Image (cartoon, rainbow, N blue to C red):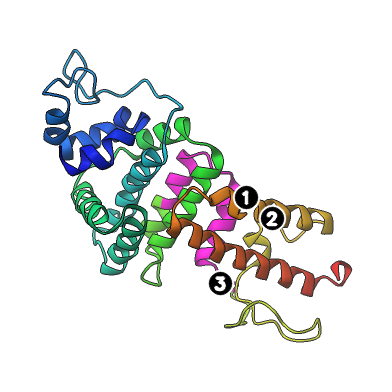
Amino acid sequence: MGFFTKVILAGLGWSLGGPIGALLGLLLGNVISKATGGDTSASFFNTSDGTPHRGPYRNTGTQADVNVALMVLIAAVMKVDGNVKKSELDFVKRFLLQNYGEEKGKQMLKVLQQMVKQEIPIDQVCAQIKVNTDYNTRYHMVDFLFGIGGADGDFQQSELNMLRLISQYLGISQGDYTSIHERHTGYSGTGYSGGSGRSGGSAGRSTYTKDPYKVLGINSSASDDDVRKAYRKMAMKYHPDRVAGMGEEMQRNAAEQMKEINQAYDEIKRRRPSMK
């Protein structure tokens, strides 16, 4: 039995159906066909009329489903600017090795490299993911994808357009999208530069470079209570218990983003005497 069959196939549920399954079928059809004894009638390969199977979707996904679904979205982001960068590959390779181990991770990377060459129906893929995962999982998927887009220290407009599209298709709220976008790409343009977001006092000149309100997904006109509520809401998204089953790399990303959120909250308190 081949690698994919032993490592991924046995753990997959909903991702063997729908457009994700159709994409995997293009890459791994022979492997899975052998694993099923040549009978693909119960798999995602073909329906009775010979077209790719696209349903039904079921809320029975495992972590393997989530990881494979994330790989499809990773491929969409990596290929959108027409140039798969080494920094992006290194970022993804680290994710795969930490989630699957050395041997399995390298095999998954080969699958991803082939997937980048395929046409990805991003609206259909996101629809399948949306039905089969909860909001918190989808939110962290988008957050992680931004990390890939910025792996080289820069974002192409095509990458940002794709990330926005994925976010919309996955049903991520505007406030949450604004927060993710600002944390990964933001620069306030106010003339401040560098620093950690802590000024050392209300009279000091802040070195914070991002819009702290956008980081919390709110407007600068928000009341003090609304700021506190937004901070608590964001902090809950990155609580260790909420990301415990998402793999080491996504947990590390969550910890880094929580630092950004704390810095933004500190900066707002610095600017607002009423919150001291």
The amino acid at mark 1 is Gly
> Residue 78 versus residue 46: which sits nearer the camera?
46
Left or right: 186, with 148 as reference point: right
Q: Report x, y in % for residue 64.
A: 36, 41
Which of the numbered marks, if any, corresponds to residue 175?
1
Q: Name the residue under label 3.
A: 187
Quick one: quadrant of the N terminus? top left
Look at the image and give the residue range highlighted in magenta: 163-188
Q: Where is residue 175 in the image (x, y as percent from the top left)?
A: 62, 50
Q: What element carries label 1?
A: helix
Q: Residues within 10 Å of mark 1 (few under 14, many from 20)?
A: some
Task: Identify the mark nearer the N-term, 3 or 1.
Answer: 1
Quadrant in the rendering for residue 256: bottom right
Q: Which of 271 and 112 is in front in this view?
A: 112
Question: Residue 32's spot in the image, x, y percent?
Answer: 17, 32
Residue at the spot 50% in from the left edge and 66% down from the top edge: 185
Mark 3 to mark 2 CA distance (whole Å): 16 Å
Q: Which amino acid does label 3 sit on?
A: Tyr
Q: How crowded is mark 3: few (under 14 residues within 10 Å), some or many (20 or more)?
A: some
Q: Are the residues flagged by discs 1 and 2 in contact, CB closer than 8 Å?
A: yes
First reached walking from the N terminus: tag 3 or tag 2: 3
The quarter of the rendered structure image containing the C terminus is bottom right
Q: In the orientation shown, which residue stands out farthest toward the right?
A: 274
Residue 72 shown left or right of residue 182 in the figure: left
User: What amino acid is found at the position of numbered circle 2 in the picture?
Assistant: Ile
- Which numbered disc covers residue 218? 2
Q: Where is residue 3 in the image (x, y as percent from the top left)?
A: 19, 44
- Which element type, helix, strand or loop, lies under badge 2? loop
Label 3 SS: loop
Separation (CA) of disc 1 from disc 2: 7 Å
Q: How crowded is mark 2: few (under 14 residues within 10 Å), some or many (20 or more)?
A: many
Please tell me whether the stretch drawn in magenta is mainly helix, strand or loop: helix
